[in-house]
Structures are given as structure tokens and as C-alpha cells.
Amino acid sequence: MRFVSTRTHGILDYLSVGTLLALPRLLGWSKDVTRLLTGAAVGTLGYSLLTRYEFGAVKTLPMQAHLTLDGMSGALLCGAPLLFPDEDGSVTGALVALGLFELGAALTTETEPRTL
């Protein structure tokens, strides 16, 4: 069931970029986790700017492709405990929570903007 508008999703995209950049730095997480989240943030920013929705700057990437990338990013974050077995459980738990948030957004967002 897709009930999140692409406009709302766009706002969440840019808020997520800020969160992914700030969280590991504010909480003093390891360099490896910080690098992973920085890469996720840069990737999200890049494909968000390219997406054909209200907050896209270039509007070349279809929304469905954007949502697929969100799902892949979310799955990677959900797999973080396997990537970082020595990290504290609170860190890997937060990564899984971020991943589940991304998966949820990918599965519940409309695939076409209402208006551009």
C-alpha cells in the first residue's frame, strides 16, 4: 500500500542525508561505520537530486528507480551487523533501524509524483 507522497518522500530524503552525515559523528561511532553512512548519505543526495520528483534538481531518474535504490540501501544497512561484527550492539541496532526506515519508505511511497 503506497500512501506516502513523493513530496513527503523528498523531504525525508534530504533529512536522511543530514541524519546519515551527523549521527556517527555526534555519537562518536567508528571510522568504518562513519564511512558507510557517509557513503550512503552521498549516494542518497546524488540520486535524490537526479530523481523525477518535486525535490529533484535534474529530474532524469524515474521515481521507481529511486525507490529501488532506497530499498538496496536499506537492505545494506539492515545487513550492517554482518559487516561490523565487532561494533557495539547499540550501533548495529541503530544501523538496522535506519535500514528498516529506508525499506519502509521505499515500500510505501507512491511511484509517480502527483504534480511536477
Image (cartoon, grey):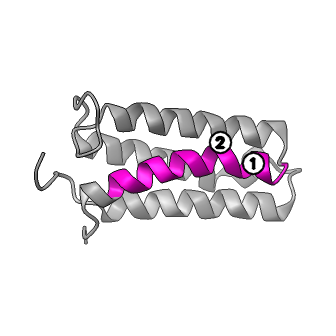
Please identify the quarter of the rendering in which residue 39 is found. top right
Amino acid tagged 2: Leu
**Left-right relation of 34 to 110:** right
Q: Earlier in the sequence, mark 1 or mark 2?
A: 1
Task: Tell me if residue 12 is in the magenta stretch.
Answer: yes
Q: Which residues are magenta?
A: 9-28
* Count of marks overlaid on the render: 2
Please identify the quarter of the rendering in which residue 11 is found. bottom left
Front disc: 1 or 2: 1
What secondary structure is marked by label 2?
Answer: helix
Amino acid tagged 1: Pro
Give above or below for 33 relative to 39: below
Q: Which mark is residue 24?
A: 1
Between residues 113 and 69, which one lies in front from this camera angle? 113
Residue at (32, 60) in percent of width and height: 8
Residue at (45, 47) in percent of width and height: 14
The quarter in which the N terminus is drawn is bottom left
Give the overall secondary structure of the magenta segment: helix
